[in-house]
Image (cartoon, coloured by chain):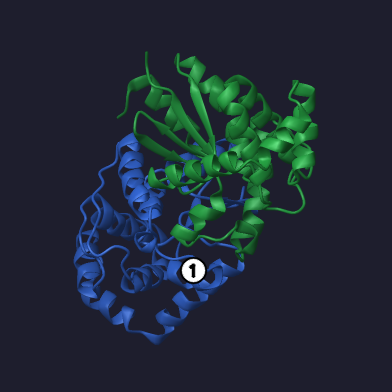
Chain colours: A blue, B green
Amino acid sequence: MPASIDFYFDFSSPYGYLASTQIDALAAKHGRTVTWHPFLLGVAFKTTGQRPLPEQPIRGPYHVRDFDRSARLLGVPFKMPEPFPFPSLAACRAFYWLDDRDEPKAKALAKALYHAAFGEGRDVRAVDAVAAIAKPLGIDPAALKAACDDPGIKDKLRLAVDAAISRGVFGSPFIIVDKEPFWGHDRLDQIDRWLATGGW
Amino acid sequence: MPASIDFYFDFSSPYGYLASTQIDALAAKHGRTVTWHPFLLGVAFKTTGQRPLPEQPIRGPYHVRDFDRSARLLGVPFKMPEPFPFPSLAACRAFYWLDDRDEPKAKALAKALYHAAFGEGRDVRAVDAVAAIAKPLGIDPAALKAACDDPGIKDKLRLAVDAAISRGVFGSPFIIVDKEPFWGHDRLDQIDRWLATGGW
């Protein structure tokens, strides 16, 4: 059975959101599955020296325009949240807690969080906000909130972030197909071709 | 007659080279022409706070791989020059000198310089190297060398760089279609669609 595709993303990344609406269907087209890996882009930035886009003159305004234009092209809803970027610790911890127990549900939660943050522009920073989004998926809010305070879950996230950076992940989305790394939602066409041909 | 497409690039930019092999044909497909604008990305970096890719941990090695992979996908020759990135003052000045006199020939020189630098991995920094590449195109080497020392041509390049940054150009390639800005050779598909539809 071919290896799963690794999908790295930060919940505060608009391009990660765009990729999240496409990646499972793209993989399925080629008989592949996707393993989702939320991480903290801000930690990677400490290694690479990058700064969040809104802090970058000229580049920041361009990207706001590009987020929206790229979303329109894909036909997915898009609304920038405030603040942006935002810390996504609670979202990540809730994901990794659930991922141990029920991977499809963890993925459903990630999709719901992304939709809330960038499809509806909602504030998903607080653990209460994450729990409220999780509840309709049949996830117990109290258990989720407890998990976000669990030192074991906090460690799990730290290890996941370190593992991502060790694999060379420096942006969001970052997708690894059979050891071949692709950065950016604008590489989905290349990934499609790579999966079809095994490389070029 | 529809407006020309503005193509901004740095001669030291691999992605600019990749776009340079495609942009005229892409525009022609839609009955459009392209105005080429070499500029100095390093000056834009002073505004945006970016650094050259080789200086960026993790990001640098990824991009070397991506340059090569993207070139293979397009089927164009690719070889990294040493050093990289490199100062392209002579190439830019030669271009703007020629552009005043013979725009098609200036564009032919730009293509020859890009091919030498990234198709063959040659060092095109020195004015002598630029003149040697220009000579087979029927461009007088002595006149080119004199132009590169001409204060009027130096000023012309400075004004071109300032004008690019004033228009929001921060990367290479950067393409403006009817006031709509697109950054990156990976936006050529979007540009194709924009030209076909007038936007979305």
| Residue drawn at (32%, 39%) of the image | A69
Q: How many labels does the image show?
A: 1
| Residue drawn at (66%, 58%) of the image | B61
Instruction: Please provide percent x and percent y for residue B72.
Output: 69, 36
Q: Nearer the viewer, residue A65 or B105?
A: B105
Q: What element carries label 1?
A: helix
Instruction: Please provide percent x and percent y for residue A65.
Output: 32, 45
Which three-letter amino acid code belongs to the residue tagged 1?
Phe
Residue farthest along the bottom direction in this orientation: A151
Q: Which of A72 and A124 is in front in this view?
A: A72
B93 displayed left or right of A156: right
Q: Identify the subunit bearing mark 1.
A: A
Q: In which quarter of the image is residue B167?
A: top left
Quadrant in the picture for the C terminus of chain A: top right
B35 displayed left or right of B124: left
Query: Can you see residue A83?
Result: yes
In the picture shown, does residue B189 fall above or below B91? above
Q: Which of B154 and A57 is in front in this view?
A: B154
In the picture shown, does residue A76 fall above or below B32? below
| Residue drawn at (20%, 73%) of the image | A128
| Residue drawn at (59%, 59%) of the image | B59
Instruction: Please provide percent x and percent y for residue B80.
Output: 74, 46
Q: Dot 1: within a 10 Å radius of its alpha carbon, few (fewer than 14), some, or many (20 or more) residues?
A: some
Q: Mark 1 points at which residue?
A: A45
